[in-house]
């Protein structure tokens, strides 16, 4: 019998994370998902991703400290930019860096496993300049995580997807993403309204394709 493979998924409660649960269940079945994926969130909790087999139980991100035999990592845990106002810049920076540091240590202890993460198009603002944490903490911190993946990629498959526009089953509400608004209205036969004052051309990548599912 082949040895059982165990993948680690962080950030499972976000919309990327729930997509990363839904799609493999469709491809590999509910038993494979529940037996072969270690699901992590900020705290232990049940993650409802619309499965007919029920939710999955996520362990705390701190559990990464005890895992030394993983076969792969999909890292999606990150506090989004709207949390800055809620918690303040310094706490936002400290909490996101704590997540990154924990993942960095996990990668160090598991030196050969393939790793996948998502960054943001916002990080591009600092491609040619020094990141400014106080001016744009979200973009600067995403740059820091990209650097971690570059440095670890010499000895493993390490993929970073810098996301500008993504689609997926659990895409955020229509107040945040225009695509969600357009699709929602189309599905119920409502008129689609475009409020932009200038032409906008945008392409979308499916989350499931970025995550290799």
Image (cartoon, rainbow, N blue to C red):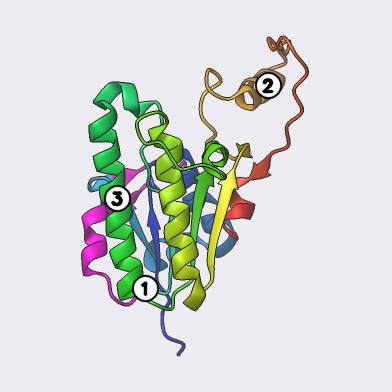
Image quadrant where residue 71 sits: bottom left
Give the CA distance from mark 2 to mark 3.
34 Å
- Name the front one of labels 2 and 3: 3
Measuring from the top left, give residue 140's x and y in whole percent. Answer: 42, 40
**Mark number, residue 182:** 2
Task: Looking at the picture, tell me which residue is in the foreground, 129 or 113.
Answer: 129
Give the CA distance from mark 3 to mark 1.
18 Å
Q: Is residue 181 visible?
A: yes
Q: Is residue 53 visible?
A: no
* Residue at image mark 1: 70
**Mark number, residue 99:** 3
Height in image: 189 above or below 102? Answer: above
Measuring from the top left, give residue 93's x and y in whole percent. Answer: 29, 38
Measuring from the top left, give residue 62's x and y in whole percent. Answer: 21, 56
Task: Looking at the picture, tell me which residue is in the foreground, 144 or 163.
Answer: 144
Quadrant of the image containing the N terminus: bottom left
């Amino acid at each position: 019998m082949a040895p059982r493979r165990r993948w680690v998924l962080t950030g499972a409660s976000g919309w990327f994370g729930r997509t990363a649960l839904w799609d493999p269940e469709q491809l590999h079945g509910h038993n494979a998902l529940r037996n072969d994926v270690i699901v992590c969130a900020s705290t232990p909790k049940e993650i409802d991703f619309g499965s007919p087999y029920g939710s999955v139980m996520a362990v705390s991100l701190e559990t990464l400290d005890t895992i030394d035999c993983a076969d792969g990592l999909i890292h999606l845990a990150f506090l989004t930019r709207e949390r800055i106002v809620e918690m303040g810049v310094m706490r936002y920076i400290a909490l996101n860096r704590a997540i990154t540091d924990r993942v960095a240590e996990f990668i160090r202890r598991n030196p050969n496993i393939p790793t996948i993460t998502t960054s943001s198009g916002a990080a591009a603002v600092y491609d040619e300049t020094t990141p400014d944490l106080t001016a744009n903490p979200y973009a600067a911190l995403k740059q820091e995580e990209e650097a971690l993946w570059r440095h670890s990629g010499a000895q493993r498959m390490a993929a970073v997807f810098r996301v500008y526009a993504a689609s997926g089953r659990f895409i955020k509400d229509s107040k945040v993403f225009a695509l969600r608004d357009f699709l929602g209205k189309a599905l119920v036969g409502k008129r689609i309204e475009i409020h932009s004052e200038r032409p906008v051309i945008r392409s979308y990548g499916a989350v499931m394709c970025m995550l290799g599912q």
